[in-house]
Amino acid sequence: MGNVPTKLDQESNGGRSVNSDTSANVTGEEVRARGKRTTSLVGSILSNNRVRSESNAGKGSRKKSTREKEEQKEDNARKLVIRFDETVDGGYLAPHGCYSLEKVDYDVDIVRKLIIDRKLAPFYIPLQDFDESWTKEEVTKIVDGLPLHAPFNEHVEEYEDVPVGNLKDPFFDHLVDKSLSKKEQRKMHALIFKARLHRKRIQWQESENNAYLEQKYDDRRDQSTTTHKFLPNDELKYELYKNGAECPICFLYIPGPLNYSKCCQQPICTECFVQIKRADPHFPHDEVDPTKPQADDSEKDPNLLISEPSSCPYCATPNFSVTYTPPEERKVGINGQHPNSFIPVTITEREIKNYTVTSDDIRPDWESKLNKERARLARRSANATAIHVSNRLIGPHRTATTGSDDSQSESTSRAGGRSTGITDNALDELERQMVNEAIRLSLQDEKRKRKESKKN
Ligand SMILES: [Zn+2]
Ligand SMILES: [Zn+2]
């Protein structure tokens, strides 16, 4: 008897009705043919996905290596150091540190530029309180005692017991425990990198703080020489703080003018403004019925993932934005007078400049983050569907096997001969699902590519 049942085999195989045999045989043949087709469809969807992601990685936005990503993170972290010689109108280009380092994740270059262009209030060194009755001497004395940066939290629980090695050595892979799985090793590498960066940021800021203190000390010791051009004179210190206001979010007293929410005209300091951002991409909440078990996120259509613009922290108006009117009478620092020779200017003809900055302006990557998350979910669900379909195809053959596992051909022939449990309808449905999925993924990919090419 041949391995593959043929019509002849069936005909010579007496004892069974020709009709049922024939139909069973046709079904069996079809099952295998379809099986092959569907399997290759599964394969092509899977490999298509692979090719797609590889070609995406190869085009323009070449996927960055871990090392490159880490260098970029370090570069950003360096720009978050407050430097006393980088000032705009008496404020700075980096936050004072009211929020922990880990929470600072806005686009550093964009915010620096907005501050230099005087479209957003600079970061200031805040005061806990301000008393209207303080004299100019008292104010300058208090301001002189302010640190450039808030004290750091040196003991972050997450980094405790994480080896950091020599921070001057750029390579630290020898610190990773090689007995761990590849995945765990990657995790440990990432954690060591974060812990090292945390330490480095503290060191960078401390050395800047020391330079600032030395400069201030030199100035005080030698009253006859002019002060360092980047250090504010007493006039500027007083001007800054006597015109301040309390930020209603951090409750700290900040030199003015502050930013104002566009919707309800409430003051907000820049350090609080840069904390406001979109929530991570998520599925809409409104359709959730608490009485029914919630569908797993992996079963939902990735295209339904949304990312909502942040709302005003005061009045909840969506699309949060702030306006800022730079102080024309106090244009000091970058592109202005030297802070040490500040003299208040009286502006007679005042042209009021007013700028608006939205929350999305300082995190423009929100859309690519959303698309990335959608693509990730789509890939995951395509893989899950493919695995599910191939399981359903293989399953019935397996259950038809009565003999040992190695009698593959025999079981196939039996499966072919005896009907397999997969009906024509079910197969059509599966095939339809696979084709739909393939079309959907390809359309989605096209859309994304078109969007990306439009951007570039
Ligand atoms: Zn604030
Ligand atoms: Zn508002």
Image (cartoon, rainbow, N blue to C red):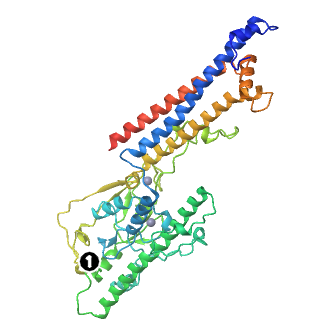
The quadrant of the image that shows the C terminus is top left
Q: Quadrant of residue 40?
A: top right
Toward the top, the furthest residue is: 18
| Residue at (48, 77) in percent of width and height | 151
Which residue reaches farthest left?
Answer: 349
Image spot of residue 417 (x, y percent) = 74, 17
Q: Which of the 4 image quarters holds residue 416? A: top right
The answer to whether any part of residue 269 appears in the image is no
Q: Residue at x 46, y 42 (%)?
A: 53
Q: Position of residue 422 (x, y in %)?
A: 70, 21
Residue 268 or residue 377, whichever sits in front:
377
Looking at the rendered structure, the number of numbered marks drawn on it comes to 1
Viewed as shown, does residue 74 lie left or right of 157?
A: left
Mark 1: secondary structure: helix
Q: Nearer the viewer, residue 443 or 5?
A: 5
What's the residue at 57%, 66% (across, down)? Answer: 176
Q: Residue at x 76, y 33 (%)?
A: 405
Percent position (x, y) of residue 236?
Answer: 29, 78
Left/right of residue 435 with respect to residue 244 in the rendered view: right
Residue 8 visible to the viewer: yes
User: For the view shown, which residue lies furthest in the front direction?
Assistant: 1
Where ligand 1 lies, by image quadrant? bottom left
Q: Which residue is mark 1?
A: 339
Report the front residue among 207 and 288: 207
In the image, residue 283 lies at what x, y percent?
56, 42
Q: Nearer the viewer, residue 165 or 110?
A: 165
Instruction: Rate crowding at label 1 as few (under 14), some (14 to 19) or many (20 or more) other CA atoms within 10 Å.
Output: many
Q: Is residue 340 above or below residue 304?
A: below
When asked about the image quadrant of residue 341, the answer is bottom left
The disc labelled 1 sits on which kind of residue?
A: Pro
